[in-house]
Amino acid sequence: MAGANTLEFTDDNFETEVLQSDRPVLVDFWAEWCAPCRMLAPTIDELANEFAVALKVGKVNTDTSAEVAAQFGISAIPTVILFRDGEIVKKFVGMKTKRDLKSAIEEIIAG
């Protein structure tokens, strides 16, 4: 359930891939059974393609990577978090439009 530029983040690689990343990172917390998550997936893949150079984009399956989900207090999915330098910059809970997510990404890249 990921596009060519959409990575898979897990309990094992989250620290390295997200928190220690030299680029901003968009993380989509999702699960297979979550209909809104599946509806958001194409948008996440589009953003991954559009911002492939400036931004790392990936997904955390909350069913298989429960430690990371718990670490960031994920209590509802989909939740999308933007990280920069290992810190949370912006957090979206529930369905968001591509325009909302893109605007937040552009703000983080510019800042």
Image (cartoon, rainbow, N blue to C red):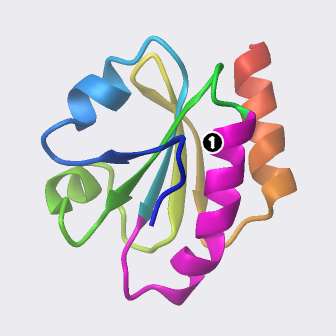
Asked if residue 45 lies in the magenta stretch, the reply is yes
* Residue at x 70%, y 31% (from the top left corner): 51
Q: Could you say which quadrant of the image residue 90 lies in?
A: top right
Image vertical order of residue 38 relative to residue 21, above or below: below
* Residue at x 32%, y 17% (from the top left corner): 20
Image vertical order of residue 51 relative to residue 99, above or below: above
The x, y position of residue 27, in whole percent, is: 47, 46
* Residue at x 54%, y 40% (from the top left corner): 5
| In this rendering, position of residue 21 left or right of residue 2 | left
The x, y position of residue 74, in whole percent, is: 36, 63
Image vertical order of residue 39 relative to residue 80, above or below: below
Residue toward you, 39 or 3: 3
> Residue reaching furthest front?
4
The x, y position of residue 96, in whole percent, is: 73, 65
Label 1: which residue?
48
Residue toward you, 58 or 101: 58
Which quadrant, please, contains the N terminus? Answer: bottom left
Image vertical order of residue 67 relative to residue 49, above or below: below
Residue toward you, 14 or 79: 14
Mark 1 element type: helix
| In this rendering, position of residue 2 left or right of residue 14 | right
Name the amino acid type tagged 1.
Ala
Q: Could you say which quadrant of the image residue 87 lies in?
A: top left
Residue toward you, 95 or 50: 50
CA neighbours of label 1 inside 10 A, class few (<14), some (14 to 19), many (20+): many
Asked if residue 58 lies in the magenta stretch, the reply is no
Q: Main SS type for the magenta part?
A: helix
Where does the magenta region start and end? 30-50
